[in-house]
Image (cartoon, rainbow, N blue to C red):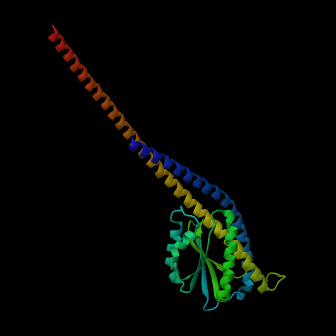
């Protein structure tokens, strides 16, 4: 009875865990639907800004200068929550594989789950908590902006000559290394014969364009990363639920087997009791018969 009760309790516990996993799965599905809309809109914004920057830099590309001893800042974007498979592991392996190509790099790590992959890495100059849902991305960006301002003061603006992002790209379905700043200078000749007419000095326009592009690009990158994270979490939850259901089936078979054994044992006890009772009754009858003969 005790063994059957333990199995029944275990089945009930697995049922509760399945309910939690199903809720997490539904939350991932909800985020995927929201992010699908955000990403398509943000992609149009990025395309528009990049087209404008190509027109501008085709004539004013010389305004972007990189010192010889510049430092390269990598923004590595991971997850704040777990249960998303190899999401953070893939990012850590990518950085370890490619950082040898850049011997003067600094890392800003986004997401506490990813930060564990960079324990004791002296190139990590800052880390911030990540986001769990799309509505929290704006807060993450504000924290990142504060960190970037601090780093610019610490290492001097001219020392950080390049800023790049390492993240999961939803379109390429892989970890991507993407340069954000400086803006890409077109290699071909401009499409127009004359430079664009500006109401600002070219240097001022470039500064504002850079800020606008970085703001829009980071939104797109965070949306893309969170989309992949939720896809991997969805897959992880589905696999976990499938394994859990298999365990419940096996436990149910064990429960039925134990119950069957208990029923057989009860039947055997009943039969043995009946047999013992029959033997007692027979002995009693024989004793009565003997006493009857003695009386005669």
Note whether 90 is above or below 32 in the view shown.
below
Q: Give the percent coordinates (x, y) of residue 163.
A: 63, 80
Front residue (pair 239, 112):
112
The single residue placed furthest to the front in the displayed view is 295
Depth order, front residue of 252/240: 252
Where is residue 198 drawn, in percent x and y?
Answer: 82, 82
- For the image shown, how many numbered marks are present on the structure? 0
Q: Quadrant of the N terminus?
A: top left
Q: Residue at x 18, y 14 (%)?
A: 291
Please tell me which residue lies in front, 226 or 182. Answer: 226
Query: Left or right of 115: which side holds 213?
Result: right
Q: Quadrant of residue 164?
A: bottom right
Q: Is residue 242 visible?
A: yes
Q: Is 176 left or right of 134, judged from the image as shown? A: left
Q: Residue furthest right?
A: 199
Query: Is 3 in front, or is 111?
Result: 3
Which x, y percent locates residue 197? 83, 81
Q: Which percent across, then down, holds residue 48?
A: 73, 71
Task: Choose top left, top right, bottom left or bottom right for residue 276.
Answer: top left
> Which residue does the image show at 51% across and 79% down from the upper left?
120
Query: Residue 72 sits in which quadrant?
Result: bottom right
| Residue at image point 64% right, 91% down | 67
**Does residue 18 lie above or below 61 as drawn?**
above
- In the picture as drawn, the residue positioned furthest to the bottom comes out as 68
Q: Residue at x 53, y 66 (%)?
A: 87
The answer to whether residue 120 is above or below residue 243 is below
**Viewport quadrant of the C terminus:** top left
Residue 50 visible in the current orientation = no
């Amino acid at each position: 009875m005790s063994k059957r009760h333990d199995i029944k309790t275990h089945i009930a516990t697995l049922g509760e865990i399945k309910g939690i996993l199903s809720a997490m799965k539904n939350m991932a599905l909800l985020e995927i639907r929201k992010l699908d809309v955000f990403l398509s809109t943000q992609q149009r914004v990025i395309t528009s800004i990049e087209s404008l920057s190509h027109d501008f830099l085709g004539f004013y590309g010389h305004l972007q200068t990189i010192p010889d001893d510049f430092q390269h800042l990598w923004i590595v974007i991971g997850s704040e929550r777990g249960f998303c498979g190899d999401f953070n592991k893939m990012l850590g392996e990518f950085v370890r594989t490619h950082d040898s190509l850049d011997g003067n790099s600094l890392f800003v790590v986004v997401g506490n789950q990813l930060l564990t992959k960079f324990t004791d890495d002296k190139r990590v100059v800052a880390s911030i908590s990540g986001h769990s849902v799309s509505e929290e991305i704006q807060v993450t960006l504000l924290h990142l902006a504060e960190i970037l301002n601090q780093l610019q003061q610490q290492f001097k603006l001219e020392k950080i000559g390049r800023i790049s992002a390492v993240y999961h790209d939803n379109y390429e379905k892989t970890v991507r290394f993407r340069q954000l700043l400086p803006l890409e200078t077109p290699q071909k000749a401009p499409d127009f014969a004359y430079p664009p007419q500006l109401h600002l000095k070219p240097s001022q326009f470039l500064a504002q364009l850079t800020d606008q592009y970085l703001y829009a690009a980071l939104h797109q990158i965070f949306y893309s990363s969170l989309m992949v994270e939720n896809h991997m979490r969805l897959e992880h939850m589905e696999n976990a639920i499938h394994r859990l259901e298999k365990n419940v089936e096996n436990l149910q078979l064990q429960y039925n087997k134990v119950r069957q054994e208990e029923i057989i044992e009860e039947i055997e006890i009943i039969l043995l009791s009946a047999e013992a009772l029959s033997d007692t009754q027979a002995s009693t009858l024989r004793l009565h018969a003997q006493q009857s003969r003695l009386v005669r």
